[in-house]
Image (spheres, rainbow, N blue to C red):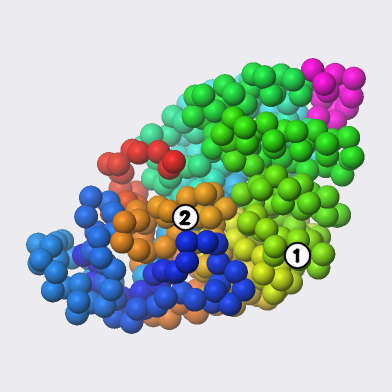
């Protein structure tokens, strides 16, 4: 039993992603408590009611001590194992190619060790579910290596949702005359293989402003949908309109970045089921151009927040920083940013039935914060406000601990 939260942010609400005014609804319970059994939330409500339940009388108590309690963060866009040969402001195609060669020469054990350290740091900062993309270009050996490393992280402190990110080839990789063969190989062999082996849940498309590649991208998303992989679109381009149209047409789970989105793009997303995943950390580390969150929200789009963590180009893995930047640089309110970083992030990963809010029957992924009002989360930039991180009912990090606790439950994220 987690007892005595000054503010318990449950985010209980509709089953759909939150839009417009619904982003402000955190469903707060003052002096709230939670009862957890076998890693699942059994009861959520006022302390007076929860403490009178029969199971509560036998429960181990964890005191929230007048703090804020909320769902664990869902980081729905990262490049945890991004291969790079340098630390330029942004990954060029040649940089990706060089990084893929470097990744092939690195042992799987070294990659796994590096990933574990990063995942443990995410847990310390409150992330309990994280999406991880590949993205080595058309390099099957490097792509498969990343996916296998992610599958091997059985003792991970947080849940991993793996995504295959397809970078359509430029001349740096294969010439235009070879593209039909590449396309056939991806569709006939690689995607079915990773789906059959359950190595990825999503197929992401790195959008490029090219009409021919756009048609190929549509075929790729359609093929992924037919074999059971959900689609995503990576749209960090100056004119994302075509990418938005493609994502909406193919019912992609999310379209990400959108730093250059227009009012027309916002209107299109407002009429669709595709989540707009915004990445303020990427803007902070690059050119300072932030996605128009206010326009997207006002148009009715479902907005999520993520870190875009990349050890070379966006070395920020703290979702608290994403919330703070969204408030200070993107015009979002603290309540909107928290909803976008939890329940809407879960919708961007098609995981909202199990994570993203504190409701009976969902996974007990819980944060206890060292603040007494949720609005303070937006004001303490650069600080880690997490007192305790709980994943599926197990404390995986607690303030004052030197090392994270082992996680007993090794079930996959999906």
State the image coordinates of residue 11 (x, y, percent, origin top left).
Answer: 44, 69
The structure residue drawn at horizontal position 82% and vertical position 64%, both measured from the top left corner, is 264
Residue behind mark 1: 266
Determine whether, in the image, residue 362 is placed left or right of residue 23.
Answer: left
What is the magenta range?
A: 169-181
State the image coordinates of residue 251 (x, y, percent, origin top left).
Answer: 66, 48
The structure residue drawn at horizontal position 29% and vertical position 68%, both measured from the top left corner, is 44
Of residues 115 and 40, the one nearer the viewer is 40
Determine whether, in the image, residue 338 is placed left or right of residue 69.
Answer: right
Q: Secondary structure at mark 1?
A: helix
The N terminus - image quarter: bottom left
Q: Earlier in the sequence, mark 2 or mark 1?
A: 1
The C terminus - image quarter: top left
The reply to whether the magenta stretch includes residue 174 is yes
Q: Is residue 145 above or below residue 261?
A: above
Determine whether, in the image, residue 308 is placed left or right of residue 234.
Answer: left
Of residues 291 and 272, the one nearer the viewer is 272
Of residues 355 and 338, the one nearer the viewer is 355
Of residues 363 and 281, the one nearer the viewer is 363
State the image coordinates of residue 164 (x, y, percent, origin top left).
Answer: 62, 35
The structure residue drawn at horizontal position 79% and vertical position 17%, both measured from the top left corner, is 181
Determine whether, in the image, residue 238 is placed left or right of residue 16.
Answer: right
Q: Secondary structure at mark 2?
A: loop
Residue behind mark 2: 352
């Amino acid at each position: 039993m987690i007892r005595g939260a000054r503010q318990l942010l449950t985010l209980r609400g509709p089953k759909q992603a939150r839009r417009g005014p619904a982003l402000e609804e955190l469903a707060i319970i003052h002096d709230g408590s939670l009862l957890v059994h076998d890693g699942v939330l059994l009861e959520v409500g006022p302390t007076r009611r929860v403490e009178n339940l029969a199971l509560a009388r036998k429960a181990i108590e964890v005191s929230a001590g007048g703090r804020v309690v909320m769902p664990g963060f869902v980081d729905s866009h990262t490049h945890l194992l991004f291969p790079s040969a340098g630390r330029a402001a942004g990954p060029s195609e040649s940089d990706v190619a060089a990084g893929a060669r470097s990744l092939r020469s690195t042992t799987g054990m070294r990659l796994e060790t590096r990933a574990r350290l990063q995942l443990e740091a995410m847990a310390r900062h409150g992330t309990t579910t994280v999406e991880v993309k590949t993205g080595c270009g058309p390099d099957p050996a490097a792509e498969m290596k990343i996916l296998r490393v992610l599958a091997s992280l059985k003792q991970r402190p947080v849940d991993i949702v793996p995504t295959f990110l397809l970078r359509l080839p430029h001349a740096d990789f294969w010439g235009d005359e070879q593209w039909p063969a590449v396309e056939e190989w991806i569709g006939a062999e690689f995607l079915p293989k990773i789906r059959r082996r359950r190595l990825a849940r999503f197929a992401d498309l790195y959008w490029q402003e090219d009409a021919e590649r756009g048609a190929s991208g549509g075929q790729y998303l359609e093929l992924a949908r037919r074999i059971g992989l959900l689609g995503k679109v990576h749209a960090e381009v100056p004119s994302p309109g075509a990418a938005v149209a493609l994502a909406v047409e193919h019912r992609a789970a999310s379209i990400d970045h959108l730093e250059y989105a227009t009012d027309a793009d916002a209107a299109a997303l407002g009429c669709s089921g595709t989540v707009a995943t915004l990445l303020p950390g990427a803007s902070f580390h690059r050119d300072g151009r932030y996605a128009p969150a206010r326009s997207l929200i006002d148009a009715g789009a479902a907005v999520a927040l993520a870190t875009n963590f990349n050890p070379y180009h966006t070395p920020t893995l703290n979702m608290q920083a994403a919330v703070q930047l969204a408030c200070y640089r993107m015009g979002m309110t603290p309540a909107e940013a928290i909803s976008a970083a939890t329940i809407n992030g879960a919708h961007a990963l098609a995981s909202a039935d199990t994570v993203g809010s504190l409701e009976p029957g969902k996974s007990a992924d819980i944060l206890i914060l060292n603040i007494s009002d949720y609005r303070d989360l937006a004001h303490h930039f650069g600080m880690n406000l997490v007192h305790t991180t709980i994943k599926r009912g197990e404390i995986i990090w607690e303030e004052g601990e030197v090392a994270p606790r082992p996680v007993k439950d090794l079930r996959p994220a999906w």
